[in-house]
Amino acid sequence: MKWSLNIGTIIILTVLLTSMRVMGQTESVDEDENEASNKHRLTILMANAFIPAADNIADQNSVFIVPAWGINYDYWFNHKIGIGLHNTFILQQYKIEKSQENVIIERSFPVIVTGEFLFKPVRNLTISLGVGREFEKHESFTVINTGIEYGFELQHGIELSLNFLYDNKIDAYDSWMFGVGFSKFFSWTNRKE
């Protein structure tokens, strides 16, 4: 009797452990398929930009921070590499001292548009490198930027992320931006019924 109870316990444990392993593999495959199908990401970013070149202007604060919004679209080739179109809207007027010429330039609600290369060295961490243009009615500048983002996965393909971005406006000025992003992952698949 004691021997049969141990054999029964072993059989039950074996069946349970085997089924857990099979279910675990199924969930992993489902996650990989889901990640592969969610190639598109749309992000809305709320941020603040620190502009050091504005510090030297007499009628501005010594620490000059302006509000900004971002709307970003990313396409992921796989779970590590993607490209994106990132758009930043600065929501304030300010003056900067142009680095090369010591000339004061007024900036009025500039818009920055960049093409980005995206790389995920680990699951929730994204590093970006981009090139683009800052458009503004007085003068536009070429922009080179780099950024780092850490995302927190929520439900239904939604992600909350912390973003840090450095913009170098060539021969003009630099800015640092810190923000919070809300992203939605999705796919555009044609399903045949």
Image (spheres, grey):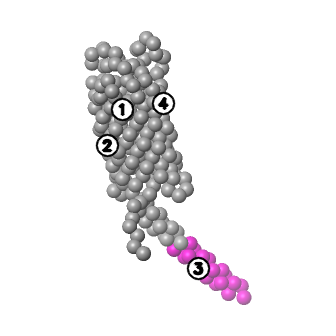
Q: Is 33 displayed left or right of 139 in the figure?
A: right
- Is there CB contact under 8 Å for labels 3 and 1? no
* SS at circle 1: strand
**Residue beneath disc 2:** 115
Can residue 170 be seen from the camera position used here? yes
The residue at which mark 3 appears reads as: 15
Q: Point out residue 29 in the picture as x, y percentages from the top left corner.
A: 45, 68
Q: Nearer the viewer, residue 10 or 135?
A: 135
| Marks 2, 1: nearer the viewer | 2
Query: Which residue shows up at 45% across the image and 63% down it?
Result: 34
> What is the C-alpha distance between the residues marked 4 and 1?
15 Å
Per the rendering, the mark at residue 184 is none
Figure check: 179 above or below 22: above
**Magenta segment, principal secondary structure?**
helix
For the magenta stretch, what is the residue range?
1-22
Cα distance between the residues tagged 3 and 2: 52 Å
- Judged by depth in the image, the label closer to the viewer, 3 or 1, is 1
Few, some or many C-alpha atoms within 10 Å of disc 2 (few <14, some 14-19, many ≥20)? Answer: many
Provide the residue designation for mark 4: 67
Mark 1 lies on residue: 167
Q: Residue at x 45, y 13 (%)?
A: 59
In the image, what residue type sits under mark 1? Asp
